[in-house]
């Protein structure tokens, strides 16, 4: 892959539906975080939507709507509430994702808070500073985010940021400089 | 960029266009309803109804959800079943779709997308997610009509898109439609058309770039 990623091609392939599970999950994690990817996906959805006119019409089995009703029996409509952005995952997975997202967000906040305190309280000579640039890059990224912004980012997005930062760190540790540089670069450019 | 009004025009036929003649020959597990709606006026009404129903669903109106289901489930089930190819999976995903509609109707923004396109996108995304999770492989049999996009009665938007698809080399067009209608991965397409995966990938990227250029947007 070239260093300059073909965002439009990736978005097109995502909308076409030909990405494998891992690639698809990656795009879905990046989508809420990267404006250009999100816009490219929406543009491809618009371009290709007319094809759905030709989709067959098939009556669902009778009784299916009753199952829907049973599943939402305990839920008041949450549509109007400012819930997490729709990631369009099935509910089973959506709950998992949201749960995991919240957990990851807590972890991210804890880590970030730890760094902030560590920076404020300790003199400059921290243990890992000299060891590896990866740690420095990772810390630097979290250190630069401001706390007020955290509060405004939905948990799911924050979890995505956290995942991407960890991937960047892992890539760096594994010696994959290209990947690490690209990921850290992407994190830097993120606009919350 | 087309104006929002143009876009709405382009998409509003989604739930109103009956299957083309070729689809009648497709073996399907479920009974098909031969809904023959009379083109645009009906679709516009359905279009308005869907948006209003979504707003009511967002407010917690179960009856509105039922009306929405009545107006859209035949189309969405068709989309989902074509991707998944199995009735039990399609049933589960269609359930997910309407539970998702119940939970997220408030996020629908009529200024940005038509209600039918919003619903279809939700259905397609959930079906593709399920397909990737179950890793079921490609459908056993493909109907013969996949090489052509669209039926006899087409909206202006579909005519434009079909013209651009028809300008692609025939294998390239076939690959694009296999991906879009059945959610086949590059690997699955590669097995089906007998090309190396890398070649499928470059064909897809090339076709996408050509389509974008041809559509001029």
Image (cartoon, rainbow, N blue to C red):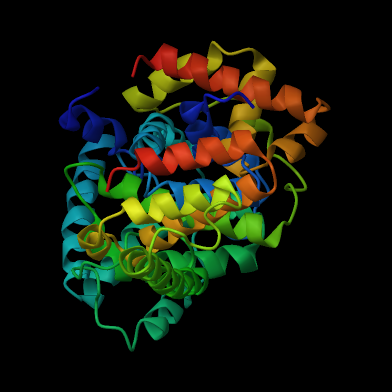
Q: Nearer the viewer, residue A68 or A104?
A: A104
Please indicate whether residue A116 sits to the left or right of residue B23 in the image. Answer: left
Residue B118 versus residue A30: which sits nearer the camera? Answer: A30
For image coordinates 34% across by 87% down, the residue present is: A73
In this view, the residue in front, B52 or B43, is B52
Q: Is residue B29 visible?
A: no
Residue A38 vertical position relative to residue A123 in the rendered view, above or below:
above
Q: The N terminus of chain A appears in which quarter of the rendering?
A: top right
Residue B213 x, y percent position in the rendering: 43, 13
Q: Is residue A39 visible?
A: yes
B68 displayed left or right of B85: left
Give me the residue at 33% from left, 49% from top.
B118
Whether residue A163 sits left or right of residue A115 in the image: it is right
Q: Is residue B43 left or right of residue B145?
A: left
Outermost residue on the bottom side: it is A74
Q: Quadrant of residue B197?
A: top right
Pinpoint residue A12: horizontal percent, then vertical percent.
Answer: 50, 32
Residue B1: image location, x then y, percent = 25, 22
A80 vs B47: above or below: below
Tell me the residue at 37%/47% (across/down): A33
Q: Is residue B93 above or below residue B164?
A: below
Task: Residue at 36%, 38% (x, y): give it.
Answer: A189
* Number of numbered discs overlaid on the protein picture: 0
Q: Percent x, y for residue A63? A: 47, 78
């Amino acid at each position: 892959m070239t260093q300059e990623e073909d965002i439009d091609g990736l978005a097109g392939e995502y909308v076409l539906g030909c990405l494998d599970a891992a690639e698809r999950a990656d795009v879905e994690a990046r989508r809420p975080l990267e404006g250009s990817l999100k816009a490219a996906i929406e543009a491809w959805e618009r371009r290709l939507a007319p094809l759905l006119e030709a989709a067959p019409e098939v009556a669902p089995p009778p009784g299916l709507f009753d199952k829907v009703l049973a599943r939402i029996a305990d839920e008041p409509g949450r549509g109007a509430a400012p819930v997490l952005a729709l990631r369009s995952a099935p509910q089973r997975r959506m709950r998992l994702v949201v749960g995991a997202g919240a957990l990851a967000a807590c972890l991210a906040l804890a880590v970030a808070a730890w760094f902030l305190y560590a920076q404020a309280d300790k003199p400059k000579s921290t243990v890992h500073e000299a060891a590896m640039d990866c740690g420095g890059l990772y810390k630097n990224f979290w250190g630069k985010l401001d706390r007020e912004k955290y509060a405004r980012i939905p948990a799911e997005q924050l979890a995505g940021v956290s995942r991407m930062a960890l991937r960047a760190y892992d890539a760096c540790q594994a010696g994959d400089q290209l990947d690490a540089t690209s990921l850290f670069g992407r994190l830097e450019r993120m606009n919350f | 960029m087309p104006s929002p009004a143009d876009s709405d025009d382009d998409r509003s036929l989604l739930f109103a266009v009956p299957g083309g003649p070729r689809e009648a020959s497709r073996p399907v597990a479920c009974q098909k309803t031969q809904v023959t709606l009379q083109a645009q006026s009906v679709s516009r009404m359905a279009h308005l109804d869907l948006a209003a129903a979504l707003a009511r669903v967002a407010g917690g109106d179960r009856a509105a959800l039922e009306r929405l289901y009545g107006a859209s489930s035949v189309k969405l089930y068709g989309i989902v079943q074509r991707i998944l190819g199995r009735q039990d999976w399609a049933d589960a995903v269609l359930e997910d779709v309407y539970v998702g509609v119940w939970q997220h109707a408030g996020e629908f923004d009529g200024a940005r997308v038509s209600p039918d396109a919003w619903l279809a996108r939700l259905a397609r995304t959930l079906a593709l997610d399920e397909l990737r999770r179950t890793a079921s492989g490609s459908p056993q049999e493909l109907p013969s009509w996949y090489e052509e996009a669209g039926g006899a009665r087409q909206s202006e938007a579909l005519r434009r898109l079909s013209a651009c698809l028809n300008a692609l080399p025939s294998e390239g067009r076939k690959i694009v439609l296999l991906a879009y209608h059945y959610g086949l991965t590059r690997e699955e397409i590669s097995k089906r058309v007998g090309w190396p995966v890398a070649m499928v990938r470059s064909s897809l990227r090339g076709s996408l770039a050509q389509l974008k250029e041809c559509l001029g947007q």
